[in-house]
Amino acid sequence: MENKTFKALVVEEPDKNVFIRKVKDITINSLPAGDVIVRVKYSSLNYKDALSATGNKSVTRTYPHTPGVDAAGVVEESAEGGFVPGDQVIVTSYDLGMNTSGGFGQYIRVPAGWVVKLPSGLTLKESMIFGTAGFTAGMSVHRLTAYVKPEQGVILVTGATGGVGSIAVGILSRLGYSVTAVSGKSDAEGLLKKLGAGEIISRKEFTENSNRPLLKVRWAGAIDTVGGEILATAIKSTGPLGVVTCCGNVASPELPINVFPFILRGVSLIGIDSQNCPMALRKEIWTKLADIWKPDMLEDLYDEISLGELDNKIAAILKGQLKGRTLVNLDR
Ligand SMILES: NC(=O)c1ccc[n+]([C@@H]2O[C@H](COP(=O)([O-])OP(=O)(O)OC[C@H]3O[C@@H](n4cnc5c(N)ncnc54)[C@H](OP(=O)(O)O)[C@@H]3O)[C@@H](O)[C@H]2O)c1
């Protein structure tokens, strides 16, 4: 393919630990080696992208770099892997946007093993309204619902207005589960009730008087997206043989808890790692997101922005201020 020039958000480190972000013209030849070149139509903003965009070296080791752990678009060229020009595809996870130039650019070049054909029932745009956050919500639901059925009781979702949390509330409600949502936002009720949450608890109230080793049983299971004291409180108030999933650390990477919920109630804690999800399960989850898991109000769950508008959204996601998902339209 000719050495085209295209637009990308580039994060540079002009001086040690000083980072600047600019939308710039870069070239196809500057992309890493790979099997498949994709013309990216949509990406989305995830918490990890904001870390990469602000110089977090545990996410991105070297700069200049184009973040974006999510990309959906059309194959322009493929050396192998069963893809042909014109195929609509999703690329998320693996190293995309971390140390491989990511979806905040109009082109990516990636190994064929990272690419998933867009399942029928999903548009490119919808796939990126989900993005990694929605996929992680799907993985969390997949793990939890294998053990906990709707008739067993209420499911708790924390960080409920965030990307993972809001989509988890939507999928669980669609599957007939009763959902209680924990949120730090005073205006969360409208969105969360529309998504199907039956009850909303404020973040502050949730952890009040929660430092005993076991708390009154309130949930059959929980999807936690924040970690720390909130995750500990969720585990301590989950009932016998309940399941709690854990995927994030926006509140804290610590887990202040002892063994009693595990040895006296048989509660299980399941870790969620979407980045290394095996391809067979990855395809199964995307297929379900395109069909039986697709929340009815997906269209109400996002803000659509251009590359140039990412800057303010990156600052907001780091402060925990965003609701739902931020879709990036690469043609805008
Ligand atoms: N393991 C994986 O594979 C995987 C994949 C994707 C994401 N993640 C992680 O999952 C977490 C959530 O991701 P996301 O995309 O949903 O992020 P997000 O859109 O920024 O949502 C996070 C939500 O957490 C709540 N929150 C923010 N700061 C908080 C604090 N200090 N204490 C308690 N709650 C707080 C807020 O919701 P409320 O205001 O409603 O409380 C916020 O909207 C992140 O840590 C992300 O890195 C992990």
Image (tube, rainbow, N blue to C red):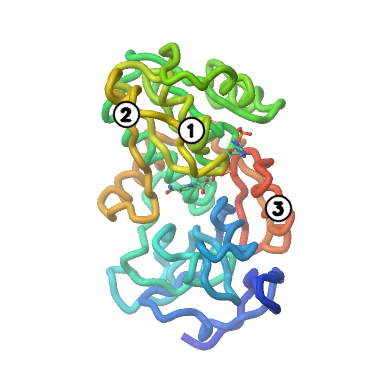
In which quadrant of the rendered view does residue 36 lie? Answer: bottom left
Q: Is residue 95 visible?
A: yes
Q: Is residue 174 visible?
A: no
Q: Which residue is mark 1?
A: 295
Q: Which residue is mark 2?
A: 145
Horizontal and vertical percent position of residue 37: 44, 74
Horizontal and vertical percent position of residue 81: 28, 70
Quarter of the rendered structure image containing ligand 1? top right
Horizontal and vertical percent position of residue 288: 35, 40
Nearest the eye: 93 or 61: 61
Q: Does the Cβ of the disc 1 residue fall within 8 Å of ligand 1? A: no
Disc 1, disc 3: CB below 8 Å?
A: no
Q: What residue lies at 48% left-to-right and 70% top-to-bottom?
A: 99
Q: How far apart in space, not on screen, are marks 2 and 1 (Cα)?
A: 16 Å
**Label at residue 259:** none
In which quadrant of the rendered view does residue 187 lie? Answer: top right
Q: Residues within 10 Å of mark 3 (few under 14, many from 20)?
A: some
Up the image or down, 79 lies above or below 160; here it is below
Q: Which residue is mark 3?
A: 315
Mark 1 residue type: Pro
Q: Secondary structure at mark 1?
A: loop
| Among the two numbered marks 2 and 1 on one chain, the one whose residue lies closer to the N terminus | 2
| Among the two numbered marks 2 and 3 on one chain, the one whose residue lies closer to the N terminus | 2
Q: What residue lies at 50% left-to-right and 79% top-to-bottom?
A: 31
Q: What residue lies at 42% left-to-right and 22% top-to-bottom?
A: 236
Mark 2 residue type: Thr
Q: What residue lies at 49% left-to-right and 54% top-to-bottom?
A: 124
